[in-house]
Amino acid sequence: MNEGNWRKRRGVHSPWRSDTPRSAPKFCNVTLMGSKGQGGGNNDEQCMRLRRGTAAQIWQTICFNWTTSGVSVRDTSTFDVACEPNGTQNLSGDLMVKESILFNAGAAGKTY
């Protein structure tokens, strides 16, 4: 089997905007701690970086001490997964962060 064909069929090095299946992890009861306020910590970190059209169910999660943000949705293809395609911006249910706490997030130390 040609390695290039195998890689293409497996989604390796292929365009991610329309490939399926996409990532759709499910996380529940997770605590994620950042390095905000610690010496030598990363100055650009997000608790959750959702990108490349991912779907996810993230429930009952605590994000604490992240320097940039609690959740970062990085691109249009990820927004397209999160929202219904009819342009109304109704949530589709394919990408959700639910019953979670974002504490001391970003430079201003916001809590959500």
Image (tube, rainbow, N blue to C red):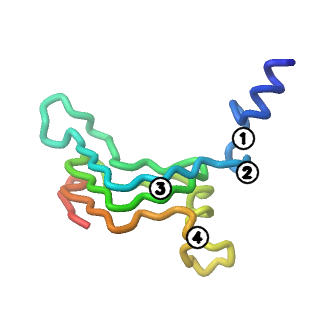
- The reply to whether discs 4 and 2 touch (Cβ–Cβ < 8 Å) is no
Q: Quadrant location of residue 13?
A: top right
Spatial CA span between label 1 and label 2: 7 Å
Mark 1 = which residue?
A: 15
Mark 4 = which residue?
A: 83
Q: Position of residue 7 (x, y in %)?
A: 75, 27
- The reply to whether discs 3 and 4 touch (Cβ–Cβ < 8 Å) is no
- The reply to whether discs 2 and 3 touch (Cβ–Cβ < 8 Å) is no
Q: Position of residue 71 (x, y in %)?
A: 38, 55
Q: Residues within 10 Å of mark 2 (few under 14, many from 20)?
A: few
Q: Which residue lies at the image location 69% right of the left edge and 31% below the top edge?
A: 12
- Indicate which disc residue 73 carries: 3
Left or right, 111 with respect to 68, comes to: left
Work out whether mark 3 precedes mark 4 in sequence or the reverse, and give the earlier one.
3
Numbered disc 3: secondary structure? strand
Q: Position of residue 17 (x, y in %)?
A: 69, 49
Mark 2 = which residue?
A: 18
The kind of residue tagged 3 is: Val
Does residue 75 sit above or below 95 in this rendering? above
- The reply to whether discs 1 and 2 touch (Cβ–Cβ < 8 Å) is yes
Q: Which residue lies at the image location 43% right of the left edge and 48% below the top edge?
A: 49
The kind of residue tagged 1 is: Pro
Residue placed most toward the observer, 86 or 33? 33
Does residue 33 sit above or below 53 in this rendering? above
Give the farthest residue toward the front: 29
The kind of residue tagged 2 is: Ser
Spatial CA span between label 4 and label 2: 16 Å
Numbered disc 1: secondary structure? loop
Spatial CA span between label 1 and label 4: 21 Å
